[in-house]
Image: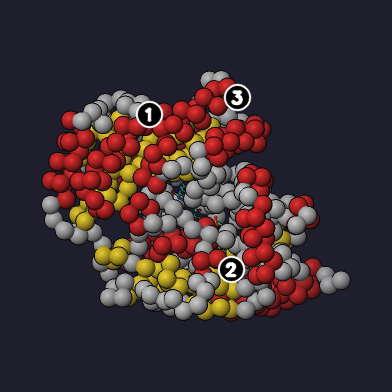
Amino acid sequence: MMSDAAFLSRLREKLGTTGVLMDPAQCESYAIDWRRLFQGKPLVVARPSNTHEVAAVVALCRDYQIAIVPQAGNTGMAGGAVPDASGRELVLSLARMNTIRSIDPVGMTMEVEAGVILKTAQDAAAAQGRLLPVSLAAEGSAMMGGIVATNAGGLNVLRYGMTRALVLGLEVVLPDATIVNGLRHLRKDNAGYDWKQVFIGSEGTLGIVTAAVMRLLPQPKDSVTALLSVPHPQAALDLLACVQSELGDSITACEMMAGFSLGLVEKHFGLRRPIADGEWFVLIEAASTLSGLREATETALGHALQRGFALDGIIAESGRQAAELWQLRERITESEGKEGKSVKHDVSVPIPLIPAFLRAADEAMARLLPGTRINCFGHLGDGNLHYNILVDRHTADEVNVVVHDVVQRFGGSISAEHGIGQYRVAELDRRRAPEEQILSRKIKDAIDPDGLMNPGKVLPRKSAHGH
Ligand code: FAD
Ligand code: 2HG
Ligand code: ZN
């Protein structure tokens, strides 16, 4: 049996001392997720600086049968980037691979390494008049490798789709250390299996994403942001349908928040909503490269108010005011964290069923834990709600089952955008049809026969499951 000391010394040979962290104090931030729910203990943290170094680490891990936990910005919501407590798993951090390899404003593509921070990539594209559309509140920390590996959603999926819709090419390192270079800058490429789709959203369980070619769009010249209060979720849907009919696909975001959620933001950040109180609020953003957007938005929202879909509303008068309205939405997660413990759900249901789903979920929660506070907000336009219950985590499993039962009854998904990680493995396994889980296991076994890539994430550990 080859020793840890031999492994670690060979790792240092490959990466140099800056590429290997072993001191527990230095490893601490890699061992726990940002919510401080999932605490592990890495054997070592490897920080390769290029794709060949990634492949060298993977080869070494294969030789010594050491499991690998890929980590990018460590902002994930499902504990996927954190090692287990055994002290036997290596964390492979992509943070040093942070080069933007190219931006092509004519072909509208951008090639980025896995450790490029999303905001850095957005800004670089914007400097060339182009838009990298992925947008989320964690964009100052999340990295492109993590964005791709989770197939991140976010605030403008309504218009631009999930990350998957924006990835043109991928470079991955397989568990056998092969580097597969699929970094094609092509809009159309039907040549053979589109294998990159298997890696997008695979949460580090199939291989390491080292670089990606992202699709860019023209940077809109004009955008309009509005906050409205609505009497109930059905009115929010009517409002969405109304503005969609009038503004078409210039709508980039349609977010819904309970008054309770904005109350948390006010309490913890002192940010006040600028319109009259309501049970529910909707934040709408439209963007266009053409002129006349503001007038069209004013007309559309005027119609929605006349028809009673909205009670009150405000359209931002400046970029600064628009940013302030977005702060009300983007600060909800942090406010929830400051308020205390919570049990999160990231669910989707068919869009027209949102009001009925909310009634049923609220009833189920009232039966389970009468009087519990619910922080519900999310991406209305995508049918994706964050239905977060403000209770101590020791009740998490019971709460998850109750909420997910309702989700399942409505034909929904128990993970709309955050992924499965370790948090939702058991719930996915008990709710997905066996045929789907067996197919997923076949994919995993074909690509990662030794089971060394992020074990126990997405799929149950093999020994614990029996297939
Ligand atoms: P990490 O957390 O480091 O990793 C996430 C998963 O991907 C892990 O399983 C990890 O093993 C794997 N992984 C990471 N890098 C690689 C790689 N290079 N190769 C293979 N596997 C890899 N998510 C949304 O979808 N929508 C939102 O609106 C949203 N808002 C958020 C708001 C806040 C305030 C926070 C804190 C998080 C939010 N998230 C959201 C969740 C999170 O930001 C996303 O999941 C993001 O894509 C994770 O990126 P990361 O770089 O932090 O990945
Ligand atoms: C968002 O939409 C994120 O802001 C975070 O997906 C959701 O905190 C959450 O539960
Ligand atoms: Zn979200």
* Residue at left offset 38%, top offset 53%: 157
Displayed quadrant of residue 129: bottom left
Q: Disc 2 designates what residue?
A: 208
Q: CA distance from mark 2 to mark 1?
A: 41 Å
Displayed quadrant of residue 243: top left
Task: State the image coordinates of residue 255 (x, y, percent, origin top left).
Answer: 35, 42
Numbered circle sitting on residue 368:
3
User: Is 164 drawn above or below residue 304 in the view shown?
Assistant: below
Q: Nearer the viewer, residue 37 or 385?
A: 385
Task: State the image coordinates of residue 366 (x, y, percent, origin top left).
Answer: 54, 22
Q: Disc 1 designates what residue?
A: 259
Q: Earlier in the sequence, mark 3 or mark 2?
A: 2
Q: Nearer the viewer, residue 349 or 66?
A: 349
Q: CA distance from mark 3 to mark 2?
A: 41 Å
Q: Amino acid at mark 2?
A: Ile
Q: Earlier in the sequence, mark 2 or mark 1?
A: 2
Q: Is the residue marked 2 within 8 Å of ligand 1, measured from its CB?
A: yes
Residue neighbourhood size for the residue with mark 1, other residues' Cα within 10 Å, grouped as few (<14), some (14–19), many (≥20):
many
Q: Amino acid at mark 1?
A: Gly
Q: Secondary structure at mark 1?
A: helix
Q: Secondary structure at mark 3?
A: helix
Q: Nearer the viewer, residue 95 or 80?
A: 80
Left or right, residue 217 beside residue 36: left
Numbered circle sitting on residue 425:
none
